[in-house]
Image: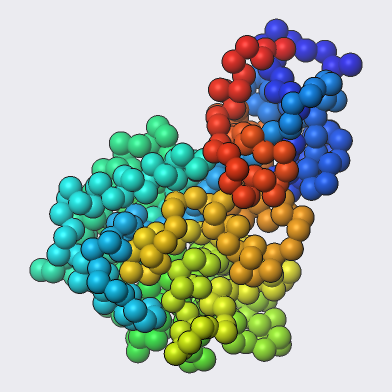
Amino acid sequence: MIALHATDLVLPNVRVPASLVARMDKFGGARDQDCVHGDLLIRNGRAERLVPARPSDALPRVVMPKLTECHVHLDKCYTISRMNGVRGGLQAAIAAQAADRVHWTRRDIRSRAMRGLEELISSGCGTVRSHVDWGRDDNPNAPSLAWSVLREMAQECSDRVTLQLAPLTDVEQIADPGVADAIAREIASGGGTFGVFVFDQADRRKGIRQAFEAADRYGLALDFHVDEGLDDRLDGLEIIADLAIETGFQGPVLCGHACKLMNLDPESLKILSEKLVLSGIAVAALPAANLFLQGRAAGTPDRRGVTRIRELCAAGVPVAVGTDNVQDAFCPLGRHDPRQSLALAVLAAHLDPPLGSHFPMITISARRALGLAPCHVDGAAAEDLILFDAATTSDMLAGVSPPKGISAAFQGECA
């Protein structure tokens, strides 16, 4: 029998995914499929451990840390209704989205971006990283209007969510050391992340090197859109890994997309995965847009654009799952919800049960990929935990109920 203090709180009848517990030997609970079950003891405002569950006829509830969205585009979302029949792959989407910018007033950007951010908050997110197109018509190296709007939103909503911003710069643009330095300095003034788009640009190696050097000078994390295609000539991810090792860069590096990994034979994939592990680079799988844009042919596609999640995880490469684009030229469907993104990754990449084992890709691993300390259930502040009315992890991932804050569940449930 555990001795309870007057300030202790006990949340009865919960399941905690085992993958989200740091110290299973101290956390307690009865093993129940991919979870541990019991009553959650909150002591001094923090989740301490599970104690034996009191008898209850109610269905258990799933407790986990707040979700982390590692990769979205809040400046672009909810624009598809303004476009006439976008058809084609990545380049067609880029062109269609660029044409839509004639509508990008401050009011338009804020309305759409706030809708997306509110969806992320309501889905249980505590941290979000959004990419933002950089540059203006009169100066491609200056902060965009969208950058200004989203910086304001990040400050306004800071009490509800941490919104990290990463400018979407072209790697050829920052091959110029002066441009790279100026952009990095501007980003650092607002606590942002240096974001870069790497495809098949001629000066991609030089631009990637400048990104590393500028990020190192200003203490910035790096986030690359890289190899977003199935062309064998794409080599950005390997260049990034090589330069990360060569420069000894210590900041976090996240590489989104990496679709070209689908082309590699097992030995080539092993060699590149070893470089990623050595460099500490994390990979963001972005199934929604990649499934929609990649492998396009005359008929039904027979190739998956999603990166090699299973092989990367098996090799020890940190992997996160992100939502990416929502209802824009790059992905005409969806909503901002990491659960939905992970569920799609499960189907697209054949991530087999137990489903709870994949939850770190939208929580612990995603936070690490953003350069943040991991948040496990044990030791977490109560305000950093969320609760789902779901009896199993599959119910939780299927989205049968919205998340609730732990504090709401404690109304009248003091120990």
At which x and y percent is residue 226?
A: 46, 75
> Which of the 4 image quadrants contains residue 65?
top right
- Answer left or right for 180 relative to 356: left
**Which residue is located at x 72 percent, y 12 percent?**
415
Q: Residue at x 31, y 39 (%)?
A: 155
Look at the image and tell me in which quarter the N terminus lies. Answer: top right
As drawn, the residue found furthest toward the left would be 138
Q: Nearer the viewer, residue 210 or 124?
A: 124
Q: Is residue 236 visible in this depiction of the protein?
A: no
Left or right position of 69 against 130:
right
Q: Position of residue 133 (x, y in %)?
A: 28, 64
Q: Is residue 355 left or right of residue 198?
A: right
Q: From the top left corner, tell me how far across and down residue 246 is, in percent.
A: 53, 77
Which residue is painted at 70% across and 65% down in the image? 351
Q: Is residue 102 left or right of residue 380?
A: left
Q: Is residue 24 above or below residue 240?
A: above
Image coordinates for residue 401, horizontal then vertical, percent: 58, 39
Work out which residue is located at the far front of the displayed protein and give it. 299
| Residue at screen point 59% across, 35% down | 386
- Residue 304, compared with residue 363, is above or below; it is below
